[in-house]
Amino acid sequence: METIKIMPCLDMKEGRVVKGVNFVGLKDAGDPVENAEFYQSEGADELAMLDIAATLENRKTRLEWVTNVASVISIPLTVGGGIASLDDIRLTLAAGASKVSMNSAAVQDPSLVKKAALEFGKERITVAVDARRNREMPSGFELVVSGGTKPVGKDAIAWARECQDLGAGTILPTSMDGDGTLKGYDLEFTRAIADAVSLPVVASGGAGTLEHFYEGVVKGGAQILLAASVFHFRTFRIREVKEYLRSRGLNVNL
């Protein structure tokens, strides 16, 4: 049985961890280095760090944030936000990231995914697929970019398939309808992605109860469970989530 991984996410703005609802109404959630150390000690399997304002502010990911966080952890670190070229990827990996996550730049130039996978190895390339419901799309989900602010008129599920074909190693789908709401992962969207690709899928956006984590695997088809609010505000400990998943018959590293 596949081992399910827990991945806290540090959404970064102005050097601090923040968390909002549907990407707005941001609240401070602490220092990134302290959070990273805490989550590793709590048993996180991986860590994500997303510079949520980089694309909107038309700038690169702040590499000092990456270096500072990477220096205190040994678990894999996925960094996203403002990564738009092979040089950006090279610098981010050199700063200590294990993987990079691309979104807007990959949509604008799909060849970047292919080139990145060839140069750095597919296991280091995650493509974040952000979407909103739109009945005019074949799958019912439209791809959005720029931190969820711009719809691009492209079917999100078809795009996930294309990313797999281009050489991506992981798909990170986030439903803008669910982010930060604590109402559960968008299982319909996550499952549609999981059914469309044979890559690891990260469930993201909306986890609020222990049951939500379980559903992300059993109903959503995810192998990695990303969450922010419930960990930042200490609703649950990571071990608590893992023990719950194990009690429901899933394989986790305790």
Image: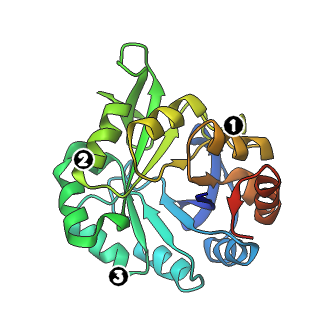
Name the residue: 63% across, 38% down. 185
Tell me the SS state at disc 3: helix
Q: Which of disc 2 and disc 1 is earlier in sequence?
A: 2
| Near-viewer residue (154 or 27) | 154
In the image, residue 72 sits, relative to residue 207, either above or below, namely below
Confirm whether residue 80 shows in the render: yes
How far across and how far down the image is residue 169, in percent?
Answer: 36, 58
Q: Amino acid at mark 2?
A: Asp
Name the residue: 69% across, 63% down. 252
Q: Which of disc 3 and disc 1 is earlier in sequence?
A: 3
Q: Residues within 10 Å of mark 2 (few under 14, many from 20)?
A: few
| Near-viewer residue (83 or 163) | 163
| Near-viewer residue (229 or 121) | 121
Q: Amino acid at mark 1?
A: Gly
- The reply to whether discs 1 and 2 touch (Cβ–Cβ < 8 Å) is no
The residue tagged 3 is 94
- The reply to whether discs 3 and 2 touch (Cβ–Cβ < 8 Å) is no
The residue tagged 1 is 184
Q: What residue occupies the far bottom of the structure in this picture?
A: 71
Q: Amino acid at mark 3?
A: Ala
> How many angstroms separate mark 1 from mark 2 (CA)?
29 Å
Mark number for residue 210? none
- The reply to whether discs 1 and 3 touch (Cβ–Cβ < 8 Å) is no
The residue tagged 2 is 165
How far across and how far down the image is residue 190, in percent?
Answer: 52, 37
Tell me the SS state at disc 1: loop
In the image, residue 7 sits, relative to residue 36, either above or below, namely above
Q: Nearer the viewer, mark 1 or mark 2?
A: 2
> How many angstroms separate mark 3 from mark 2 (CA)?
26 Å
